[in-house]
Amino acid sequence: MSILATIEYNGRSSQRAQPSHLRLELLLQDSVSEVKSKIHRALSVPANLMRLFCGNFELQDTDSLLNYYSYTNQDVEGRRCLTLQLVM
């Protein structure tokens, strides 16, 4: 099953700027390591410099997104959506 993830992150130029957003199509069975790899391809940020959070929880590389399914919301089209925060 796929979900639409919104990745919120601060741009490199200013920490005070409004967060930028990246939207990715992910699979629930994706590991956090795979998610970081997809973010790396989109933003050219090394995966080892990324920390991902879902609410107050830091995602571990060996976790599956399925562990965070309870944090998903349903959008108007009935798709499951997940918001993650990226810290670089």
Image: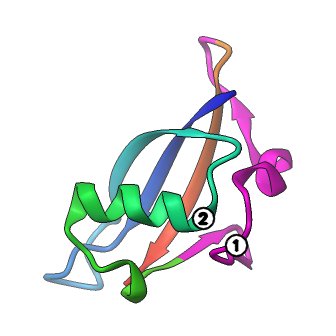
Q: Is residue 84 above or below residue 81?
A: below
Residue lying at 26% horizontally and 75% vertically, measured from the top left = 45
Quarter of the image where one finds residue 32: bottom right
Q: Is residue 32 above or below residue 74?
A: below
Determine whether, in the image, residue 8 is placed left or right of residue 44.
Answer: right
Q: Closest to the observer: 87 or 29?
A: 29
* Marked residue nearer the N-terminal end (2 or 1): 2
Residue type at mark 1 is Thr
Q: Closest to the observer: 11 or 39?
A: 39
Q: Does the magenta stretch include residue 56?
A: yes
* Mark 2 → mark 1, Cα distance in angstroms: 6 Å
Q: How far from the left and from the top, in percent, is residue 53?
A: 62, 72
For numbered disc 2, what is the local secondary structure?
A: helix
Q: Residues within 10 Å of mark 2 (few under 14, many from 20)?
A: some
Classify the position of the N terminus by image quarter.
top right
Q: Is residue 61 magenta?
A: yes
Residue lying at 63% horizontally and 75% vertically, measured from the top left = 61
Magenta stretch, residue numbers: 52-77
Residue at the top extreme? 77
Numbered label attached to residue 75 = none
Q: How many labels does the image show?
A: 2
Q: How far from the left and from the top, in percent, is residue 84?
A: 56, 60
Residue placed under numbered mark 1 in the picture: 62
Q: How far from the left and from the top, in percent, is residue 56?
A: 74, 76
Residue type at mark 2 is Val
Quarter of the image where one finds residue 4: top right
Contact between labelled residues 1 and 2, with CB atoms less than 8 Å apart: yes
Determine whether, in the image, residue 77 is placed left or right of residue 16.
Answer: right
Numbered label attached to residue 32 = 2
Residue lying at 38% horizontally and 68% vertically, measured from the top left = 9
Classify the position of the C terminus by image quarter.
bottom left
